[in-house]
Amino acid sequence: MSKRDPRLYIEEILESIEKIKDYTKGMTLEVFSVDPKTVDAVVRNFEIIGEASRQLPDGVKEKYHEIKWKDLIDFRNVVIHEYFGINKKIMWDIIINELPPLEEKIRLRVDEQN
């Protein structure tokens, strides 16, 4: 069985960030919190981000050392194992305050590689 190209995991992370941005564009926390379809879609993409992060080889994680891979993986575990206890305000804070710099760091590194 061949190993999957790590670039595909990076692409999945970026695609999931884009989807979350699209799903929540123009929303407020109040609107997001009462929209179960959007919440479900965002949760699913957080799962993808965390799982793709988990699958990345250690060498890639070291190369992108400024990214908090463990935090992404840990949040994926919370999303999967504590679905009913997920705090939507915390999710919203991550969407607004954590995803933009994460996307910027990853895109910057990808651009450097190309």
Image (spheres, rainbow, N blue to C red):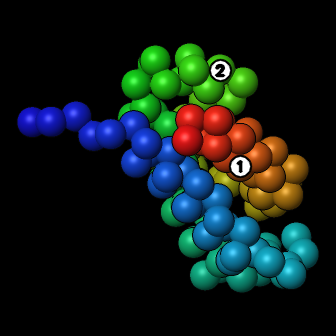
Helix, strand, or loop for circle 2? loop
Where is residue 99 shown, x and y percent of the image? Answer: 75, 51
- In terms of depth relative to the viewer, which is nearer, 103 or 41? 103
Q: Quadrant of residue 113?
A: top right
Residue at (50%, 37%) from the top-left corner?
A: 53
Query: Furthest residue to the front?
Result: 114
Q: Quadrant of residue 69?
A: top right
Say which mark, if any, is on residue 25. Answer: none
Q: Is residue 91 left or right of residue 111?
A: right
Helix, strand, or loop for circle 1? helix
Mark 2 burial class by Cα count in 10 Å: few <14, some 14-19, many 20+: few
- Residue assigned mark 1: 103
Where is residue 35 shown, x and y percent of the image? Answer: 72, 82
Q: Quadrant of residue 65?
A: top right
Where is residue 22 shown, x and y percent of the image? Answer: 70, 76
Q: From what the image shows, is residue 114 above or below residue 27?
A: above
Q: Is residue 20 left or right of residue 44?
A: right
Residue at (59%, 54%) from the top-left corner?
A: 14
Residue type, mark 2 in image: His
Give the Cα separation between the discs numbered 1 and 2.
Answer: 14 Å
Q: Is residue 83 visible?
A: no
Residue at (45%, 19%) from the top-left corner?
A: 58
Residue at (72%, 24%) from the top-left corner?
A: 66
Which of the two discs, 1 and 2, labels the residue nearer the N terminus? 2
Image label count: 2
- Residue assigned mark 2: 65
Query: Furthest residue to the left?
Result: 1
